[in-house]
Image (spheres, rainbow, N blue to C red):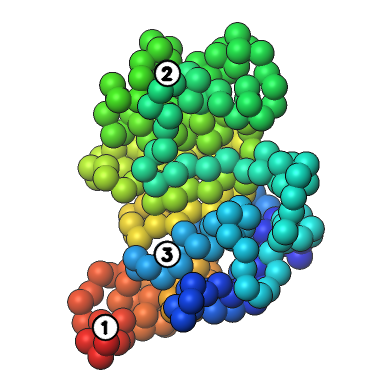
Amino acid sequence: MSNNPKISLKGVKKAFGPKVVLDGVDLDVGKAESLVIIGGSGTGKSVLLKCILGLLTPDAGKIEVDGHSVLGLKGSARTKHLEQIGMLFQGGALFDSLPVWRNIAFGLIEGKGMAKADAKEEAIENLRRVGLSPDVAELSPAELSGGMQKRVSLARAIATKPDIIFFDEPTTGLDPIMADVINDLIVDRVKALGATGVTITHDMASARKIADHVAMLYKGKIIWHGPVAEIDQSGNDYVEQFIHGRADGPIQMELRQN
């Protein structure tokens, strides 16, 4: 791990009323590293991403990108922060009213002020990068299969050449073969950009393929963090149960008590 991480979280806490979602998260993500955060539904993975993005404000703790705090950013400072981030949303979140190329070029036109003709060329080039032909550019999102929508969402996430890309459950709703295709594309595109990737998922096949490092979030804390090659020897009962999808174990025992 670099001494100067791209993203650094220290003691991050977030609660919604009495429900504590993040309970002192400490996590560093190295430059050009691909980190996958695993954990069950409702463990706070999405809340963690939203805190880094600035969509939610932590109750306590520090969040830094390139050594600078990103908490409480406003105006041009917030815009500058968001411009360096690409995002692949869980449901794709494509704009139904816009053709595919406008979806991909949205950040180029609205964020960077690129001329539409140039942005369309760039959008078509990004379609090619995710394995889609130029004729897809004129289609509407509703005309695409689930796998194609994910590819278009990935093309949009990389279009502005961001320094950081977030992937929120990138393989949800896909069959195993298409999920593997998306995983390969994520690895390829993140490396091609030299970007820092942060993925949240409960899909262990996806985690194993995408990750350089894996962190497990449980009850608001990072309970294990290490190289993906070491996850099968984590020595952590919670991690062992999760990665093997076992019904019996400490996580289930606590569920039974509630």
Three-letter amino acid code of the residue under disc 2 = Pro
**Could you tell me residue 2's position as x and y percent?**
72, 62
In the rendered image, the residue lying farthest to the bottom is: 257
Cα distance in 3D space between marks 1 and 2:
45 Å
Placement of 145 over or under 63, stated as above or below: above
**Could you tell me residue 15's position as x and y percent?**
52, 74
Neighbour class for label 3 at 10 Å: few (<14), some, many (≥20)?
many
Label 3 vs label 2, nearer the camera: 2
Q: Are marks 1 and 2 in contact (CB under 8 Å)?
A: no
> Looking at the rendered structure, which numbered label has been put on residue 19?
none
**What residue is pinned by disc 2?**
99
Viewer-proximal residue, 122 or 42?
42
- Res 140 → quadrant: top left
Question: Which residue is drawn at the image coordinates 76% and 60% (left, top)?
Answer: 69
> Looking at the rendered structure, which numbered label has been put on residue 255?
1
In the image, is 76 to the left or to the right of 17?
Answer: right
Q: Earlier in the sequence, mark 1 or mark 2?
A: 2
- Report if residue 28 is visible in the image: no
Q: Which secondary structure, mark 2?
A: loop
In the rendered image, the residue lying farthest to the front is: 17
Three-letter amino acid code of the residue under disc 1 = Leu
> Looking at the rendered structure, which numbered label has been put on residue 38?
3
Question: Which residue is drawn at the image coordinates 65% and 68% (left, top)?
Answer: 9
Neighbour class for label 1 at 10 Å: few (<14), some, many (≥20)?
few
Placement of 163 over or under 236, stated as above or below: above
Placement of 258 over or under 82, stated as above or below: below
- Report if residue 149 is visible in the image: yes
**Could you tell me residue 209's position as x and y percent?**
41, 51
Label 1 vs label 3, nearer the camera: 1
Label 1 vs label 2, nearer the camera: 2
Q: Which secondary structure, mark 1?
A: helix
Q: Earlier in the sequence, mark 1 or mark 3?
A: 3
